[in-house]
Amino acid sequence: MKHLLLLLFIPIISTAQVSGPRWYIKAGAGFGTKGFLPDGLSPKSLMPPDSSLYIADGTIEDMTNTVDSLKQKSYVHDTYTKGFNYYLGAGYKLSKHWGFELGVLWLQGGNITSRNVMDNSPLLGPGAIMDVTTYVRGLAVIPSLTLDIPLNDNWFIQARAGLTLPVYGKIYHDAVIDAQNNTIVGPVAAVLNAETEANFALGINGGVGIHRKLGKRFEVFLDLIGQHLNVSGKQMTIVRYDITIQGNTTDQLVSNPGAYHSQINFVDELTAQSNNKLNNANVDESKPKDELLVTSPFSNLGFGIGVLLKLGKTE
């Protein structure tokens, strides 16, 4: 089967020769949105426990908003790849129509926010508010095949299909808790910052764009691009957790040393041997807490604009 596909592909490459440079470099910027993609996985947030100041004893839940006076919740359906991205790539023309491109994309993800009113929290008291902001910064490698469809001497349509391979990045979580009506210790406020590292992930992407030639070396382009990618967490690290009670602020990470209070390892299942107090009364607080695997949405629909420079001799 492999040899058959190769034999079919070789004539396509050879039937139309390239006139002019085969190599090129390109740069561009884009903006991603959730678009018309269906609601899938939701972004997550770390919710505080009901009866402990140890934030790691809390639960990781889908982000929701409190939407009415009855404290009903609305899920936050969004993608981490919304916002601006920046692309740098290099390509090679296999033939007049077909090509191969390898690029890197830097994602400057936009903010995803939620607000919860926690009236049922015995620890924080009635009316406690938790505001969460989460976002991504990351780098992905994108290899793809391209197909050029000429319209005339200066305009052509380009279709592309490829893979998305995240190679660096983190999901950032910033939370602020405001509990002014705490009847036990008085007004309470907290600031939480956490970072999630991801497991290996592989996605697919494709798109179509319009290109305009500017002389023999330059092109400008406008692309419409879609991507399907979900990323599972590997480890979450709590880098800041400050609690202020009646005006006095305490660094909870210093007050409660041990990896159990500042790190979470994501696992496929929890057992009686897991390092989690809900399953094992004898946890090792020098080791990270075990928590069920969470998966975050990175699929998107967006557009990009940019410029392309051909390298080598021109005819």
Image (cartoon, rainbow, N blue to C red):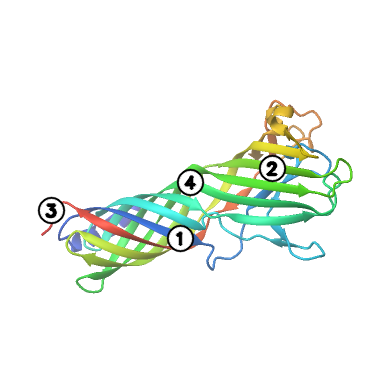
| Disc 4 residue crowd, few under 14, some 14–19, many 20+, Cα 10 Å | some
Q: Nearer the viewer, residue 116 or 288?
A: 116
Query: Which amino acid does the dot numbered 1 rest on?
Result: Phe
Query: Which amino acid does the dot numbered 4 rest on?
Result: Gly
Per the image, the residue denoted by label 3 is: 313
**Residue 310: horizontal and vertical position, in percent?**
21, 55
Furthest-left residue in this view: 315
Q: Quadrant of residue 14?
A: bottom left
Per the image, the residue denoted by label 2 is: 191
Per the image, the residue denoted by label 4 is: 138
Q: Quadrant of residue 37?
A: bottom right
Left/right placement of residue 99 relative to residue 74 reads left
Q: Contact (CB < 8 A) between labels 2 and 1?
A: no
- Tell me, yes or no, if residue 66 can be seen here: yes
Query: Which amino acid does the dot numbered 2 rest on?
Result: Val
| Disc 2 residue crowd, few under 14, some 14–19, many 20+, Cα 10 Å | some
Of the residues under marks 1 and 3, which one precedes in the sequence? Answer: 1
Q: CA distance from mark 2 to mark 3?
A: 59 Å
Left/right placement of residue 74 relative to residue 16 reads right
Furthest-bottom residue in this view: 152
**Residue 146: horizontal and vertical position, in percent?**
32, 60
Per the image, the residue denoted by label 1 is: 31
Quadrant, the N terminus: bottom left
Query: Taking 247 as reference, is 130 above or below it?
Result: below
Q: CA distance from mark 1 to mark 4?
A: 15 Å
Q: Nearer the viewer, residue 123 or 164?
A: 123
| Disc 3 residue crowd, few under 14, some 14–19, many 20+, Cα 10 Å | few
Q: CA distance from mark 3 to mark 4?
A: 36 Å
Of tags 2 and 3, the one toward the viewer is 2
Of the residues under marks 2 and 1, which one precedes in the sequence? Answer: 1
The residue under the point 69% across, 42% down is 191
The residue under the point 42% across, 53% down is 163
